[in-house]
Image (cartoon, grey):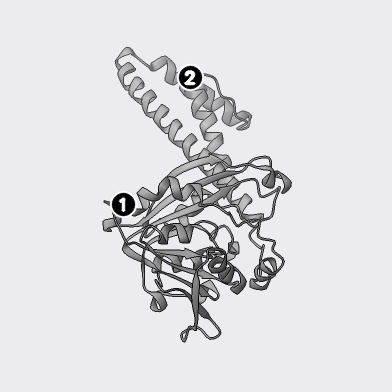
Amino acid sequence: MNDDFTGCLLVWCGFLNSWVNGIPVKYNLGPSLSSRVDQRAGDRARSTSDRYAPRQTAMRATDVLLFSLLCHVAAGSSAQVNISRMLGQQAERVMALGEWEERWQQDRIGFHQPTVHRMLEKNLDKVLNGRTGVRFFFPLCGKAIDMKWLADQGHSVVGVEISEKGIQQFFEENNMTFSEEPVPEIPGAKVFRQNPEKNISLYQCDLFQFSSSIAGRFGAIWDRGSLVAINPKDREKYAALIVSLMDNDCRYLLDTFLYNPDQYRGPPFFVPDEQVRSLFGSSCNVELLQSVDALTDRQRDWGLDSFMENIHLITLKNSSATK
């Protein structure tokens, strides 16, 4: 819906509002046409009798309903235009894989959290949904302590990360021994597995080279900084990959951020709820579980004065995960 159509709707809303409330409305129709309209309006008013009162009342209610509907559509269109404009602020922003590796080499990893993510702790029961021994997928896993926390509870973890340094630091900082193997399906890729349990497997490769043919599908996905980190132009491709990795009972926990992209160009990037529904809504149920004010000094240093964190639960439609 474009701006011109939105403007027309708003004009009609104003017209109906005035008409419904009996407020005279004047439009410049030209002197000849205006006089004929006024004359016909007067004739119609003089010929009206009491027997038409119920009909007028019914029409009045219908007009009120139409007025409310048009205003709702116009407001929704205006909001959509604003969201599109905000998304456009970061649409061309691109972070090359080499830039992420460089950040790891320089220890510029302010996105890493040294403790278990509070959103995962708070919503784990909703993800597990009574299940035990769940296979978790961590896209762009870094060295998240969340992986060990879940493995210690009897779940298995598969992660994908571009930085070999980040993967090695995960095992070393958690005092885990590991083995290293090539991944035949992805030239140059490696997989690092925890020894001896092997319930944590981290693939060092480009996320978009990963697929279900390499490690199967998953019963849960924890997206704690992946969708908000990938280049905005790649979001549709990303959503398709994530859906392809979801088993029938998969429960996908997604963390997103809301802020003014005029003030900060990312990453992490601005991902509105409307885009989450657009990316996943055709094949998945999308539920907003929580929205919290997450503004800290770190975001203030980026130039932001508002920073909201939203957590979504996404499940495949018509799957056992929705029950």
Q: Residue at x 49, y 49 (%)?
A: 274
The amino acid at mark 2 is Asn
Q: Which residue is mark 2?
A: 21
Left or right: where 148 falls relative to 111: left
Q: Which residue is mark 1?
A: 129
Neighbor class of circle 1 (other Cα within 10 Å; few <14, some 14-19, many 20+) is few
| Residue 172: percent from left, percent from top | 56, 68
Q: Residue at x 26, y 57 (%)?
A: 320
| Residue 323: percent from left, percent from top | 26, 51
| Residue 217: percent from left, percent from top | 36, 69
| Residue 17 in view of the camera | yes
Secondary structure beneath disc 2?
loop
Q: Nearer the viewer, residue 229 or 23?
A: 229
Q: Picture quarter containing residue 246?
A: bottom left
Q: Nearer the viewer, residue 92 or 116?
A: 116
Left or right: where 37 falls relative to 134: right
Instruction: Tell me: residue 308, above or below residue 149.
Output: above
Secondary structure beneath disc 1?
loop
The amino acid at mark 1 is Asn
Q: Nearer the viewer, residue 259 or 43?
A: 259
Left or right: where 162 falls relative to 221: right
